[in-house]
Image: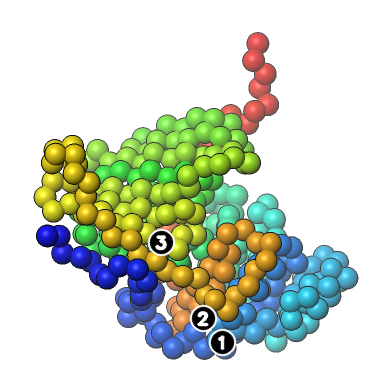
Amino acid sequence: MTKKLMPDAVASVVPRDVALGLTQAEDVAFPLRWGILGAGEISRQFVRSSRECAGATMAAVAARSEEKAKAFAAAHGVGRAYGGYANMLASDEVDIIYVGTLDALHKEHCLMALEAGKHVLCEKTLAQSAEDAREMYATAERNNVMLQDGVWTRFFPAVEQARGLIEAGAIGDVVMVQADFDMLYTIQAATLAFGAEAKPINVQASGRVGGPGGAMLEFENNRFANLTFIAFPSEFPEVTEITGTKGRITLEQPAHCPTAITVRIPPATPSRYRGGNTPSPMQRFEYPLPEAISLPGAFPNQQGFYYMTEAIHRCLAAGLRECPQFNQAESLHLLELISTIKAQRTDGSAQAE
């Protein structure tokens, strides 16, 4: 009989920063006054989730329009509204900035905040290129503040558990990753499984930028990531399969913000086709979302911002300038891979002759 990794049903996970001994769990109560840069939908979802963090105060919001900022503040219980960004960034009543503006503006807005001496959590995608991101990280280091890439997937307990099992060798050496969704999320699934230090030796991509397509990433020692980029609107599986020499982990739908994983570890050989077609024993673990957070009209599981916010509070309380769930090295690796894959895809402007 196969030994179980842990009891089925609801599972408890120690966040990576705490498990590594870098932070203290109780430091979610470390006080931080948040300034929200951008008053759009993603900022709404961030505020509604993150204000449940024990140490978080939603102190201010800034938008290009003061009227829009005031409406946002009134609707979501934010302390003060600013028209334009400069005055909020100059305020001594704000400790950390959430940048929730359009991707193309992230570099400009992050640099403004970092130069003002504010910690920054930037919504993904952090930058248009790894080169831009390096400049942003260098600015953060020069000002001794945090710049955290907001790849929130890595902070979900289900993903933290999957990473812990991979690193503990529970499924052996990872040899294959299969993921479908958009480019950023599928690529981070590959770096989650293989690690930021693993660089692909071959990348083959296809499809038009902004449309469906895919990429095959080959790593040393005959390891692969098979990534499918879906088109909206469509019905798609959106699961991530991480296969090792001893077993398999499935991040269940929606895999970019999962609340459950399935682990299959056979008692002997990892292939059912060599054992009388007998399926591997399966364990399923669930990680319910915080019940106190209500987000009507949001994308699935947006309550998960809460996990990332708590990690930031713990890490800043410990004097850290990044979260180990998704650090600078992983952020730059992700951006480099995005650029490599985009370079092989067409922009759709060429017409067939």
Above or below residue 329? Residue 182 is above
Q: Do the residues labelled 3 and 1 touch (CB within 8 Å)?
A: no
* Residue at mark 3: 260
Amino acid at circle 3: Ala
Q: Which of marks 2 and 1 is nearer the N terminus?
A: 1
Q: Residue at x 54, y 45 (%)?
A: 182
Where disc 1 sits, the SS reads loop
Q: Earlier in the sequence, mark 3 or mark 1?
A: 1
Q: In which quarter of the image is residue 25?
A: bottom left
* Residue 72 horizontal side relative to residue 102, left or right: right
Q: Are marks 2 and 1 in contact (CB under 8 Å)?
A: yes
Q: Which of 249 and 352 is in front in this view?
A: 249
Q: Which residue is drawn at 58% across and 59% down?
A: 300
Residue 55 in view in this figure: yes
* Residue at mark 2: 313
Where disc 2 sits, the SS reads helix
Q: Nearer the viewer, residue 29 or 49?
A: 49
